Amino acid sequence: MASFTTFVREQHKKLPLIPTTQDCTGGTYIITGSNQGLGYECAKHLIALSANKVIIAVRFLSRGDAAKAKIEAETGRKGVIEVWHLDLSSYDSVKEFVKKVETLDRVDAIIENAGIAMAESIIAEGLESTLTVNVVSTMLLAVLVLPKLQESARKFGIVPHLVLVGSEVAFQAKGELEKIDGDLIDGVSQSPMPGKRYEISKLLLLYAMREFASLHPYRETGVAINYVNPGLCNTELSRNAGWVQWLIIAIVRTLLARSAEVGSRNLLYAAVAGKYSNGKYISACEVKEDHVASWATNVVGRRIQQRVWESLRKKLNTIYSGCV
């Protein structure tokens, strides 16, 4: 696990823009939560790098249309961006979105960037909404889109990437999941954890990604599945935080945060990181497994990882029978 000194040093590191025009020309990319912040900057870079199609998946189409117009004006490229509706608080919305993805000729990468951090507990699809959006719907989309990515790998001889955008704050949830008896996701949803659900959701997502990738190794799928930490960035993620938490975040961001554009470079790297990134943790435009806390990968951590997956598997199969 990275020390605070390492965190500060990495926050100030000048991150490279790894993908080239050669990497992106002809490709189709999907980015969720992309009308602003990291997703918006990621989409703009892909357009500038000559991607053939960039789909920005948004909850509100009007905001997506505004982002599209702005990117087109800034890059000078039109007819490349498509705006698709996706609401991760609704499982039906995820399933409808995947139906549209299946109509595409190819998908080079899907970058699952959409996420929320809520100050108050709000229920969506029977769970606290942070878990619904950041974990269950995110993994539902991952599971359902994997066959399309596999098809693209076979058909075009490419290495498609499935990128789950996480956070280093996952490691601030040390010991929280061990407190839960029974179903982990239900247990977290029902437990009073003010100020902790976002961190826990990102830890759950990390465990889910690692297990999902181990069950779908690159040698069988031809798809690289990874988890990327964009670092602390100036975005609107904390807009729903309580005022005390918001004030603390604002002060820390003033001192240490990257711009959304710099943070987006991590997402872009993860989208082209290659087959050896499968199941791996990415940060500062590198695969950095040494940044994963040892307690998350030891015997106890592996046991928790299996519990996370079993809880998630039951939920996903209830939402979409037989998907995992």
Image: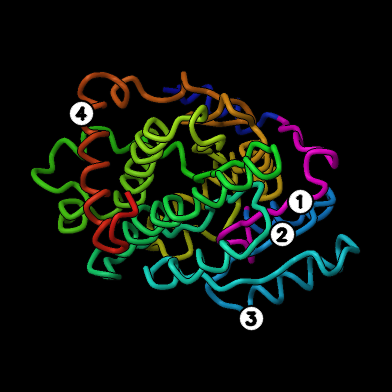
Whichever of labels 2 and 3 marks the residue nearer the N terminus, that label is 2
User: For the residue labelled by badge 4, is the local secondary structure a helix, a strand or a loop?
Assistant: helix
Q: Alpha-carbon distance for marks 2 and 4?
A: 38 Å
Which numbered tag is attached to residue 54? Answer: 2
Q: Residue drawn 79% across and 69% down?
A: 70
User: For the residue labelled by badge 2, is the local secondary structure a helix, a strand or a loop?
Assistant: strand
Which numbered tag is attached to residue 46? Answer: 1
Residue to which mark 4 is pinned? 303
Q: Alpha-carbon distance for marks 2 and 3?
A: 17 Å
Q: Residues within 10 Å of mark 2 (few under 14, many from 20)?
A: many
User: For the residue labelled by badge 3, is the local secondary structure a helix, a strand or a loop?
Assistant: helix
Whether 314 is drawn above or below 230: the answer is below
Quarter where residue 158 is shown:
top right
Whichever of labels 2 and 4 marks the residue nearer the N terminus, that label is 2
Q: Are marks 1 and 2 in contact (CB under 8 Å)?
A: yes
Indicate the amino acid at tag 2: Val
Between label 3 and label 1, give the one nearer the viewer.
1
Give coordinates of residue 41: x percent, y percent: 70, 54
